[in-house]
Image: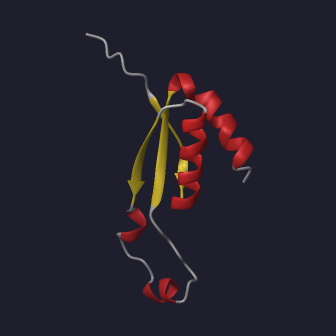
Amino acid sequence: MPDDEPLLHQLGAYDPPAATRLAELLEQSGIPFEIETDQSAFSGSNDFSGLQFGVNPESAKILIFVAEPDLSRAEKIVRQHFPD
């Protein structure tokens, strides 16, 4: 039986304030999305002195995903509001 759920695409990995803003913009545009957290920066061998002195400040990221049919509209929002 075929799966009726559309394929999800990751828009990006954002720090919490940017992810909150993007989620608000997607909601305003009527684009459904899913979020996950990426805490991989907290695992592994981080250089403690780098973290302590702010030289290597890694933090958790929020991953935002949208369905394939909404991808182009969502990417347009990202380009408009997050021009990095």
Q: Quadrant of the N terminus?
A: top left
76 versus 51 height, above or below: above
Q: Which residue extends farthest front?
A: 28
67 versus 80 height, above or below: above
The quarter of the displayed image where residue 29 is located: top right
Residue at screen point 48% across, 89% down: 49
Residue at screen point 71% across, 42% down: 79
Nearer to the camera, 68 or 46: 68
32 versus 57 height, above or below: above
Residue at screen point 61% across, 42% down: 25
Q: Quadrant of the C terminus?
A: bottom right
2 versus 32 height, above or below: above
How many discs mark residues in the rendered view? Answer: 0
**Residue 15 visible here:** no
Q: Position of residue 42 (x, y in %)?
A: 38, 70
Q: Which residue extends farthest top?
A: 1
Q: Position of residue 69 (x, y in %)?
A: 54, 22
**Residue 77 visible here:** yes
Residue 76 in the figure: left or right of residue 2 = right
Q: Position of residue 74 (x, y in %)?
A: 61, 34
The quarter of the displayed image where residue 75 is located: top right
Q: How is the image coloured?
A: secondary structure
Q: Which residue extends farthest left?
A: 1
Residue at screen point 58% across, 47% down: 22
The quarter of the displayed image where residue 34 is located: top left
